[in-house]
Amino acid sequence: MIDKIDKDIIIYLSKDIELSKNLYKDMAKIFDISEDELINRLKKLNERGYLKRISPIMVHQKSGYDSNAMVVWKVEKDKIEYFIDIIKTINSISHVYERELYPNWDYNLYTMIHGKTKNEVDNIINYLSKSINNNSFKVLYTLKELKKISPNLEELIK
């Protein structure tokens, strides 16, 4: 069970936060607790599965990354770990998921690739394809972002 302060911390972290050189110290003041107590609470929330991580989220459209593609790959089970190790070295890939296979859809790995141009995205796809000697993929370019919002945690946990 979490208390009101923990709930307030989770809600606070789910919203946009001002940049700060002393983030935890500034956050602790908001909740009228010490920085050490805040850090201990964050550790416990993480250990109990309420928090996965605290990290910035970049709005890629505002940073000049205007081209995106979901690429689905058919990768043999024994090559998945090797492929993921390559993917981890590429900062332009924000997501990678392994998915279940279906009778009419045998693509088991999904990657989201971002680039400043379509050509940049294509170069990354070609690099990945050559790195694992795999031409079994489909590229689904983003045409328009239709919905991207975080859930309103205030509604969910209060």
Image (cartoon, rainbow, N blue to C red):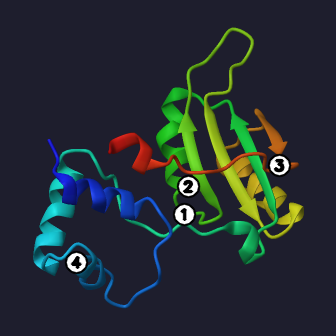
Mark 2 or mark 4: which comes first in sequence?
4
Mark 4 secondary-structure assignment: helix
Give the vertical position of 16 relative to 127 (above or below).
below
Separation (CA) of disc 2 from disc 4: 39 Å
Name the residue at 16% across, 51% down.
3
Front: mark 1 or 4: 4
- Circle number at residue 89: 1
Front: mark 3 or 1: 3
- Circle number at residue 28: 4
Quarter location, residue 74: top right
Mark 2 or mark 3: which comes first in sequence?
2
Decide if residue 156 is on the left or right side of residue 91: left
Q: Amino acid at mark 1?
A: Thr
Separation (CA) of disc 2 from disc 3: 23 Å
Q: Amino acid at mark 2?
A: Ile
Q: Amino acid at mark 3?
A: Thr
Name the residue at 34% across, 43% down.
157
Nearer-the-camera pick, 48 or 130: 48
The quarter of the rendered structure image containing the N terminus is top left
